[in-house]
Image: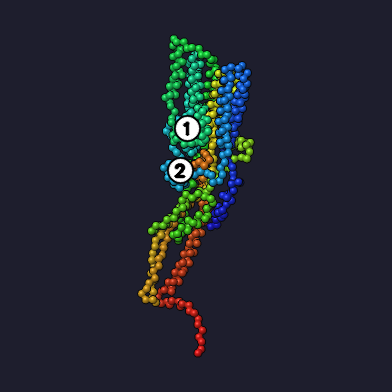
Amino acid sequence: MPFKRPFENPMSTEYSTPPSHAATVNPMRLPNTLHLTLGAFAMVMGLVLLLGVSNAEQVRAMGLGSVGRAMTGLTLLLLGGVHMGVAMRYFRFTVLPGEAGQIAVPSGTGSVSNHLVGLINDGITVRQRPDDPLLSMLYGLVPHLINAPSAIRWHAETQLRRAVYLAGVLVSFALAWVFAQPAAFAWMAGLYFALAVLLLKPFATLAAIRRGAMEAAPDTVPAPRWGAMVALLLVSIAGPLAITLSPVQVPTPPFAVATVVLPTIAVLGSALIASALFTVSLIAQTGGYSASAARHLVREDLQMPDLTSGLLERLKTRMPYPSQYYAQDHDVSSDAFDGHLLLETEPRVRADQSAPRLAEAFTAAWNSDTQRPLLALGLFGLVLGLVGVVFAFLYARSSGAAMMGLIALGFISSAQFALASAHKLWNRVDFQSTVYRVSYRGTYHRAKRVAGNAYAGNGTLAEGAVRFGPLRVAVCVAEVTSVAFARGGKRHITALDLLPDESRALFGVFEDYSRDAQDRAGQFYQQEHQVREVMSQGARPPELPQRQQTVEQV
């Protein structure tokens, strides 16, 4: 059986590409550009505000307003510096050959070898959906999310929990608007605005972006506090009614109702839009995940008259280089022999994750069905951030217009939420590699044959013989798709697809080695047969060669 690729040319230039020509992959290029744009814009606006208070005469003319302008300028500088720092940290997310991380092994599996064999035999099994009704709804909306790595599932469940809280605050806000008097509602609206900002956690979100990818995500996400949400809904209805029926007059707030209502609507509405875009992005990102399996091709008609590890060595010479060996064993017992070979070729980064120019990268992402929602989420976060910076600038220039300042805070908080959600989905590198798995097991038994030797007396010739039984060979060559969430991070396997032609080609190695072993055995038995003929009864041993001597006449 003639060999097929990759066995006809074991040393492939695909695996010996010099580092200078290796593919440069930067999946963080697009989100880094968004962070860089927002950071640069915030720093410029902050510098403009600080330059406005650099003149002593202007400071004296503005009075206390100069303090607010300076504080706003410093805050914008800090915000811009953080975003630019994020962009600089991930701007060169380069993955070169040999830098791929090891395969992530689930707890309780043991070794990478056991994990791979389990995936080949059983596939990427479908996990059971959680019993929690909220999470069941999530996995119903995103059906392939159940097959995603744990880091993505943890991120999705966390964002869902936050979106539920935001929706509860929005409903409570609407109920209070309906039932409360204007004076009471103005005070309550401030409470809802503060709750929304606390849920979005702008400073904690910045810290999460700065830390990077899904680091040490816990196994489970705590369920929403339904009791607290029900209590908030009841307060939104009972509170205004109690205030209305109470003889105590609610003091008129020192600000207009719109000063707090509009920022609250802005922060809740923008955050919920970002949550919807995140869900769409999650559906697109996880649509390719499936419960795939590779299985084995099995043959039981092969013969292997050899107990040595020569077959294993022959198989290793046919494998691509470089490769990571996870198992290479050959064992012989009293009546059986078996072997196991498992290796993975060097993971290659998917070439479609990098583009030579920035404009081409944006165009490719927008034209991709899986990347378009994610890019839209990032752009939405960028727009919210830019608008929030503009409102902060106007707030500082208007000598403390409270509504503009609150709108700025709300938009910037929602921008952090959107950019963090997109950042954690962008921060991934997809790899492709090939796994080769060969296992064989055969039986044998030993026998003895005795031949007499009448010429030499009562001597005998005892010889050993090995009788080989059936041989079972299982072969699997599969293409593996894996994803990592950090440079050099653990790779999570997302797909495992059998390559039938390459798997059948491996049987050719068995057939060739079997023929070679049979030829060697045939030559050995032929020599034994000649010895038996010599030593059998009535046969004369061959004469020893003698030196011919010249007879001299005397």
Vertical comparison of 105 with 229: above or below: below
Q: Residue furthest front?
A: 56
The location of residue 381, given as percent across then percent down, is 56, 29
Please report the residue visible at 40 percent of the width from the left and 75 percent of the height from the top. Answer: 537
The image's mark for residue 105 is 2
Q: What residue would you read off at disc 1?
A: 157
Residue 494 can be seen in this image? no
Q: Residue drawn at (48%, 12%), measured in percent from left and top?
A: 251
The CA distance from mark 1 to mark 2 is 22 Å
The amino acid sitting under disc 2 is Val
Please state which amino acid type lies under the numbered disc 1: Glu
Image x and y of residue 539, in percent: 42, 76
* Mark 1 nearby-residue class (10 Å; few <14, some 14–19, many ≥20): some
The local crowd at label 2, few if under 14, some if 14 to 19, many if 20 or more residues have their Cα within 10 Å, is some
Front position in the image: 477 or 47 = 47
**Residue in the foreground of this view, choosing between 111 and 521:** 111
SS at badge 2? loop
Q: Is residue 239 above or below residue 47?
A: above
Q: Nearer the viewer, mark 1 or mark 2?
A: 2
